[in-house]
Image (cartoon, helix red, strand yellow):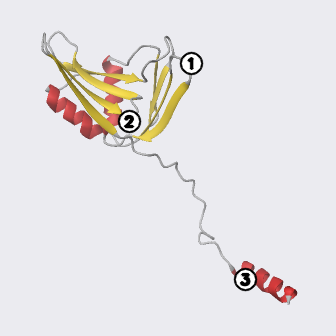
Amino acid sequence: MQLAVSVALIVAAVGIVPPDAGRPRVAHEIETIPMAWRVDQRSLRAPVRKSCGVVSRGGNVTARLAAARADGTPVWSVRVGYDNAPGSVRYLRIDRAYFTSDQESFRGREAAEIVARLKAPGVFAFEWAARANHAKRGGLFATGDFAAKAAMCERWMGGTRA
């Protein structure tokens, strides 16, 4: 009886064909979770200054639109991390573009390029060191609804320049 069951199991196992047999193997990309973003609008009284931030869940990446120029034209800055260790390097990769800085935030053309890249569907990764113990913080996400949130800020602020 045991021999008959063993033979039956072997015959059944030989007859089982995996569902993707005969198909060429294709490398699969890692699925990334879309980042959830929130908008942080601020109005300060004297002189009237406004700023609008697009903040990632967890606060690891913040793109802030503020009137930093003398003519009041809003410009973007991008900060990676919070309570960063002094002099630590902040790292941001958006698709195949890499950005690094030991400054508090990215500004000017670099910030404008980062925001433009985050507006397009894609993936981004970040890394930074926390102040207390230099512990590295990082993550890999899809850009999610960044474009919609950035557009809300741009409308509220009244336009942007690089």
Residue that numbered label 3 is attached to = 12
Q: Nearer the viewer, residue 27 or 57?
A: 57
Residue in the image at 60% along x and 63% along y: 24
Give the number of the mark in front: 1 or 3.
1
Q: For residue 35, what is the image quadrant?
A: top left
- Name the residue carrying label 2: 57
Where's residue 145, x and y in %?
A: 31, 42
Residue name at image x 35 percent, y 23 percent? 78
Is 71 left, or right, of 19 in this rendering? left
Marks 1 and 3 sit apart, C-alpha to C-alpha, by 58 Å
What kind of residue is marked 1? Asn
Measured in 3D between alpha carbons, the distance from the residue under mark 2 to the one under mark 1, in whole angstroms, is 22 Å
For the residue pair 109 and 71, the one nearer the viewer reads as 71
The residue type indicated by label 3 comes to: Ala
Of the pair 39 and 29, the residue shown nearer to us: 39
- Quadrant (top left/top right/bottom left/bottom right) for the N terminus: bottom right
Q: Which mark is residue 53?
A: none
Residue 118 in sight in this render: yes
Residue holding disc 1? 133
Seen in the picture, residue 137 relative to 73 is either above or below; the reply is: below
Q: Earlier in the sequence, mark 1 or mark 3?
A: 3
Q: Is residue 17 left or right of residue 77?
A: right
